[in-house]
C-alpha cells in the first residue's frame, strides 16, 4: 500500500455552493452588475441551508467577486474596478504601461491556453463560443465588446482547472479589462483590425477544441503580440496600465 495515500475528505456544502457561484462569475454566465438570486431562492435551487449560502456569499465578497449591498442584495462586481486589488499599488508605484501588461499576459495566457487545450470540458468550449458570438453581436450593435472579450479570456483561465491560474487572472483582470478596452476602442473604427481580433479568438478556440496545446499556445501568442505591436507603434504604448 502506498504510504503517501491520505483519506478522502468530502467537500463542505458551503464550499460547493461557493465554487458553483464562483465558476458562473469566472465563466461570464453571471455578468458584472448582475444580481445573484436571493438567499431563499439559492437555498431552494441548491437544496442547502441558509448558513451554507451565507458562508459562500461571504467568501465571494471577501475575494472581491461580489458586492453585498444592505437591503438590496448581492451583485457581481464590475470588472473594471480596482478596489482592494493587491496588484494595483505595485503596478502604480512602478509606472507600469500597457506594453508591460501585455508582456505579462504573454506568459500567463499562452500557458493558460495550452492547459485549457488539455483540460477544457465541452461546457467550457460552449462558454468560449458564446463569448465570441456575443462579442460579434456587440460590435454589430455599435458597442465595443470589452466585457465579452474579457469573458473569453477568463473562460480560458477557468478551463485550465488550475486555481492559481484562475486567481492570477482575476487579480490581473482589472488591468486586462482596461488593456482590452483601450485596444478595442482604437480598433473600433478600423473594421479590418476588429475582424482580425475576432479571427484570432476563433483560432484560439479552434486549437483548444481540437486539444492541440501547441497550437493553442501559438494562437494566443499571435493574438497578444498583434495587440502589443499595435501599441508599441503608437503613442498609447506608454500609457499607464490603468488610469
Image: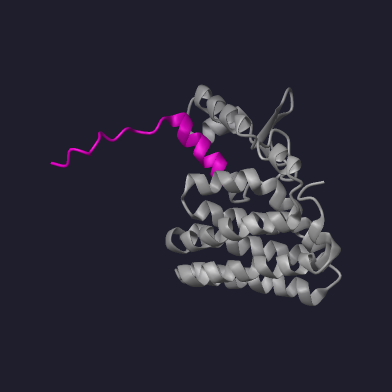
Whether residue 207 is visible to the viewer of this picture, yes or no, is yes
* x, y percent for residue 172: 65, 47
Q: Which residues are magenta?
A: 1-23
- Could you tell me which quadrant the N terminus lies in? top left
Give the vertical position of 141 relative to 18 (above or below).
below
Q: Determine the residue positioned at 80% across, 68% down.
A: 140
* x, y percent for residue 152: 63, 58
* x, y percent for residue 182: 80, 58
Please tell me whether residue 43 belongs to the stretch shown in magenta: no
Q: Determine the residue positioned at 69% across, 59% down.
A: 149
Instruction: Return the residue found at the far bottom.
Output: 192
Please tell me whether residue 19 belongs to the stretch shown in magenta: yes
Whether residue 143 is visible to the viewer of this picture, yes or no, is no
Quarter of the rendering containing residue 143: bottom right
Q: Determine the residue positioned at 77% across, 66% down.
A: 232
Quarter of the rendering containing residue 25: top right
Of 44 and 16, the residue lying toward us: 16
Q: Determine the residue positioned at 53% across, 67% down.
A: 217
Amino acid at each position: 500500500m502506498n504510504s503517501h495515500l491520505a483519506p478522502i475528505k468530502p467537500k463542505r456544502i458551503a464550499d460547493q455552493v461557493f465554487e458553483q457561484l464562483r465558476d458562473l462569475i469566472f465563466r461570464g454566465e453571471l455578468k458584472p452588475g448582475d444580481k445573484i438570486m436571493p438567499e431563499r431562492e439559492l437555498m431552494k435551487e441548491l437544496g442547502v441551508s441558509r448558513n451554507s449560502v451565507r458562508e459562500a456569499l461571504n467568501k465571494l465578497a471577501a475575494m472581491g467577486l461580489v458586492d453585498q449591498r444592505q437591503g438590496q442584495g448581492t451583485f457581481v462586481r464590475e470588472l473594471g474596478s480596482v478596489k482592494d486589488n493587491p496588484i494595483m499599488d505595485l503596478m502604480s508605484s512602478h509606472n507600469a504601461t500597457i506594453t508591460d501588461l501585455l508582456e505579462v499576459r504573454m506568459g500567463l495566457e499562452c500557458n493558460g491556453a495550452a492547459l485549457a487545450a488539455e483540460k477544457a470540458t465541452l461546457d467550457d468550449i460552449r462558454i468560449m463560443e458564446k463569448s465570441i458570438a456575443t462579442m460579434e453581436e456587440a460590435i454589430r450593435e455599435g458597442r465595443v465588446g470589452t466585457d465579452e472579450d474579457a469573458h473569453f479570456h477568463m473562460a480560458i483561465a477557468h478551463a485550465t482547472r488550475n486555481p492559481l491560474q484562475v486567481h492570477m487572472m482575476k487579480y490581473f483582470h482589472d488591468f486586462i479589462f482596461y488593456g482590452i478596452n483601450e485596444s478595442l476602442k482604437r480598433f473600433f473604427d478600423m473594421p479590418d483590425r476588429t475582424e482580425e481580433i475576432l479571427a484570432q479568438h476563433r483560432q484560439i478556440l479552434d486549437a483548444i477544441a481540437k486539444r492541440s496545446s501547441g497550437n493553442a499556445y501559438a494562437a494566443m501568442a499571435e493574438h497578444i503580440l498583434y495587440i502589443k505591436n499595435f501599441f508599441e507603434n503608437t503613442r498609447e504604448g506608454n500609457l499607464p496600465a490603468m488610469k
